[in-house]
């Protein structure tokens, strides 16, 4: 009954207010609004750090439903996907672990002190204008101290409102439906409240039964078929709602933003299929809300930035599986965050920055013997950048101070670290300014999460903090043309070497919501990322874009030569992976084909046949058509995913959907 009421209420909002919307952020004062295209070139005189970016129309054309799906097309990224529309999706950059990946939403980092993992499946592409991925940190010294501490970062930017002359509103409604009983309406309303203030309201409702057919086959080490079955995935349903409200304003020399976010979901957790056991008793309710604001102002050579955020996350987990002990637990997280970042331009080519962040996290639960932990984090960063015609340099030093207090325990756990970083970019040839060489070295540090340390069933209070040292060298060739057959091309390659000490690894422990935690000790990661893109225009109003990327990674455990898994590839990291995209745009038609390949992996520490996980690949295709009827724009999109009907697992024993489809209809005024 509660779910039905919520559906009716949401539909009323959709139809009555015309508003289930994308969140919006105002373009910074010192920038220029860009058309909706993929931004592949570095920003002149700014980009020092390797960046991958998808935005605008190129992001829309991908066969992706969530931010996690789109990130598969970036090199050096592993996405853990537990299957289905509502399956949890987390991202790992260059094998360093999910907890070393910062996720920043409209300028403020998302957090999860409980397990450190951000479920990117909760963020729809309907509400995202651009996705950027940085190895190391962003090419900007005016940023929160927290952002300097990530080994890799994903930046999500919501839609920028643009109003035509004489208009003070925009509206858009989208309806998506498809396989697995998918029903996904969303809408957007943008209002120009005054010359310098605008607002947007966005929202979305997602429901799906999550039922899909799959073939599940396992072969034992002797080569004999252990079992081969075809079944329907059960308990993978989801009912989720997202609402966002944005207020944006500008003033002389500055801007401000205010965002309110709410996500509410109920989902089944299908669990792993092991020995013909189909887990159907696990369910999870998420109720996540936060309010965040930012203020930026430039005063001559001095620029300041303030960010603040309060977040409350409520998770209810139930396991009624008769084969296991009944579980009914409630978790409440709170986060309070404040940041001030300041930048001063000493010379036209030389800037310095100083940032300070304070963050408080707490976790409450009704689990017996799980005492309430509180974490107090202080971060202080100093940074500098030199920007000359031929060479650019950025350096930073981050000091991290963390204290944990546990209710009923007088002991205070504290950690402190200094983590430096240095980046350099060189363009040595004046006659070929499109050619750039780059390199960086960076250290990062992260504390174990609350679950890592204090969870009654799996917590390990003896866990050591995890430290990473990164080395990267690369080259970029990037050119664009206004006329001719070739409109643009881009080629980049990066070689990297990462050392991880006391690496913390989480494995699913039968149930998707719980994990087994351990320190692997030392991990060495060698890798090469290669990416290329070319756009050609063979005829009038016909553009063809070819884009591809390949990643090689050797991520091995080098802790103890006496271990049976010494120098074995760490779990779920393929040596070879890649993707390819072909996009054809002719007049108002768009055709997009995408291919993803992930090589063989091992699901446990030992690289033996029993732990071997097969390679997988998928082909997706979509066709779109844009219409214009007076002042109303229309768009129809048909997608077929897993076109070749492949059987595959991203995580062992979690079968993924076979061939499926989606149809999307969009109306904008």
Image: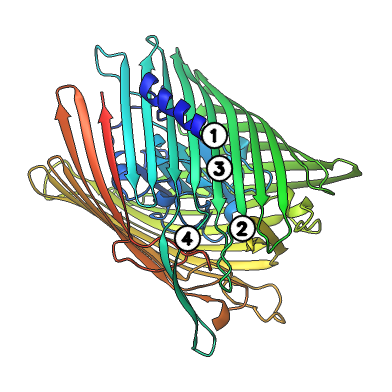
Quadrant containing the C terminus is top left
State which quadrant residue 144 falls in. top right
Residue linked to disc 2: 469
Residue linked to disc 4: 233
Q: CA distance from mark 3 to mark 4?
A: 17 Å
Which is nearer the N-term, disc 2 or disc 4?
Answer: 4
Tell me whether the residue at label 3 lies in contact with that at label 2, contact meaning CB atoms closer than 8 angstroms.
Answer: no
- Count of labels in the image: 4
Tell me whether the residue at label 4 lies in contact with that at label 1, contact meaning CB atoms closer than 8 angstroms.
Answer: no
Q: Is residue 657 left or right of residue 422?
A: left
Q: Up-down: is 585 above or below 14? A: below
- Closest to the observer, 304 or 116: 116
Which is nearer the N-term, disc 3 or disc 4?
Answer: 4
Quadrant containing the N terminus is top right
As drawn, the residue found furthest toward the top would be 194
User: Residue at left 65%, top 32%?
Assistant: 312
SS at badge 2: strand
- Closest to the observer, 64 or 85: 85
State which quadrant residue 161 falls in. top left
Residue linked to disc 1: 1
Residue 558's tag is none
Which is nearer the N-term, disc 1 or disc 2?
Answer: 1
Within 10 angstroms of label 2, few (less than 14), some, or many (20 or more) residues?
Answer: some
Within 10 angstroms of label 1, few (less than 14), some, or many (20 or more) residues?
Answer: few
Residue 266's tag is 3
């Amino acid at each position: 009954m509660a779910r039905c009421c919520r559906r009716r209420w949401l539909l009323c909002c959709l139809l009555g207010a015309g508003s289930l919307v994308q969140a919006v952020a105002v373009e910074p004062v010192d920038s220029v609004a860009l058309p909706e295209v993929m931004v592949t070139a570095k920003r002149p005189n700014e980009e020092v750090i390797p960046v991958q970016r998808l935005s605008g129309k190129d992001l829309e054309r991908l066969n992706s439903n969530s931010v996690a799906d789109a990130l598969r097309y970036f090199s050096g990224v592993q996405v853990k996907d537990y299957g289905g529309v509502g399956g949890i999706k987390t991202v790992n950059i260059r094998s360093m672990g999910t907890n070393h990946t910062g996720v920043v939403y409209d300028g403020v980092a998302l957090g999860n002190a409980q397990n450190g993992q951000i479920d990117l499946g909760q963020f729809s592409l309907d509400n995202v204008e651009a996705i950027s991925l940085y190895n190391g940190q962003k090419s900007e010294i005016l940023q929160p101290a927290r952002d300097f501490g990530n080994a890799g970062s994903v930046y999500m930017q919501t839609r920028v409102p643009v109003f035509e002359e004489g208009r003070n509103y925009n509206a858009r409604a989208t309806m998506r439906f498809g396989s697995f009983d998918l029903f996904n309406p969303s809408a957007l309303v943008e209002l120009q409240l005054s010359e310098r203030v605008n607002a947007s309201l966005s929202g979305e409702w997602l429901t799906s039964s999550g039922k899909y057919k799959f073939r599940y086959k396992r072969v034992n080490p002797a080569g004999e078929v252990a079992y081969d079955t075809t079944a329907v995935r059960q308990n993978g349903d989801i009912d989720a709602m997202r609402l966002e409200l944005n207020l944006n304003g500008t003033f002389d020399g500055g801007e401000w933003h205010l965002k309110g976010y709410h996500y509410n979901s109920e989902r089944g957790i299908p669990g792993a299929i092991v020995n013909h056991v189909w887990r159907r008793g696990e369910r999870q309710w998420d109720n996540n809300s936060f309010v965040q604001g930012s203020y930026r102002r430039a005063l001559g050579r001095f620029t300041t930035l303030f960010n603040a955020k309060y977040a409350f996350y409520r998770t209810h987990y139930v396991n009624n599986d008769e084969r296991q002990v009944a579980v009914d637990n409630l978790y409440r997280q709170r986060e309070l965050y404040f940041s001030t970042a300041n930048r001063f331009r000493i010379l036209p080519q030389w800037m310095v920055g100083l940032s300070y962040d304070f963050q408080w996290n707490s976790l409450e639960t009704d689990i017996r013997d799980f005492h309430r932990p509180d974490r107090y984090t202080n971060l202080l960063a100093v940074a500098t950048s030199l920007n000359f015609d031929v060479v650019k340099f950025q350096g930073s030093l981050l000091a991290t101070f963390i204290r944990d207090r546990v209710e009923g325990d007088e002991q205070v756990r504290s950690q402190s670290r200094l983590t430096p970083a240095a980046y350099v970019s060189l363009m040595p040839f004046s006659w070929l300014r499109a050619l750039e060489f780059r390199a960086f070295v960076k250290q990062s540090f992260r504390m174990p999460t609350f679950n890592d340390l204090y969870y009654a069933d799996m917590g390990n209070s003896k866990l050591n903090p995890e430290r990473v040292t990164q080395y990267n060298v690369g080259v970029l060739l990037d050119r664009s043309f206004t006329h001719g057959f070739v409109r643009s091309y881009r080629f980049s390659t990066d070689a990297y070497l990462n050392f991880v000490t006391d690496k913390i690894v989480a494995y699913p422990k039968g149930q998707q919501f719980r994990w087994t935690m351990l320190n692997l000790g030392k991990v060495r990661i060698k890798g090469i990322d290669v990416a290329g893109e070319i756009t050609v225009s063979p005829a009038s109003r016909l553009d063809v874009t070819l884009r591809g990327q390949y990643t090689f990674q050797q991520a091995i455990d080098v802790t103890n030569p006496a271990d049976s898994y010494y120098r074995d590839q760490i779990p779920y990291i393929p040596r070879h992976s890649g993707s390819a995209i072909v996009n054809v745009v002719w007049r108002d038609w768009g055709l997009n084909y995408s291919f993803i390949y992930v090589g063989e992996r091992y699901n446990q520490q030992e690289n033996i046949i029993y732990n071997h996980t097969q390679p997988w690949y998928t082909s997706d295709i979509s066709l779109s058509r844009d219409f214009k009827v007076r002042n109303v724009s229309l768009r129809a999109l048909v997608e077929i995913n897993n076109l070749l009907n492949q059987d595959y697992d991203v995580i062992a024993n979690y079968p993924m959907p076979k061939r499926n489809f989606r149809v999307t209809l969009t109306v904008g005024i």
